[in-house]
Image: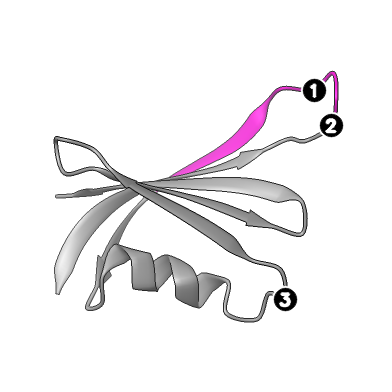
Amino acid sequence: MKEYEVIHEIFNQCPGNKTRDQFIEEIEIEETPEEWVRKKFKNEKEFRLERVEKEDGTLVIDVMTAMIHQRYTISEI
C-alpha cells in the first residue's frame, strides 16, 4: 500500500465566480491513483478523464462530469 497527498479542486463554472473549492487529504491505496479516481466516478454516465504526469512524479487528473470540472493533484509521500 502506498501513501499519497491529494489536492482535490472543484472549479466553479458560473460566470463571474472564479473561486474553487479545495480539499487536501492524505490517503493510502493499493491500486494506482488513476484507478482510485475512476472508482470515485464509477456511477457517472458522462465521464471524461485527462491525465498528466509531471517531471517530479506528481500526477494531475482532470475529471469532467455533468459539466463539473474537478482536478486531483496526487503526489506520493
Is the image coloured rainbow, by chain, by secondary structure, or in one colour? one colour
Outermost residue, right direction? 15
| In contact (CB < 8 Å): disc 3 and disc 2 | no
Q: How crowded is mark 1: few (under 14 residues within 10 Å), some or many (20 or more)?
A: few
Does the magenta run of residues contain 21? yes
The quadrant where residue 30 appears? bottom left
Q: Which mark is residue 17?
A: 1
Q: Write down the residue under mark 2.
A: 14
Q: Residues within 10 Å of mark 2 (few under 14, many from 20)?
A: few
Q: Write down the residue under mark 3.
A: 45
Q: Is residue 30 left or right of residue 43?
A: left
Outermost residue, top direction? 16
Residue at disc 3, secondary structure: loop
What residue lies at 48% left-to-right and 77% top-to-bottom? 39
Does the magenta run of residues contain 47? no
* Residue range corresponding to the magenta coloring: 15-24
Of callouts 3 and 1, the N-terminal one: 1
Q: Distance of mark 3 from mark 1, alpha carbons?
A: 27 Å
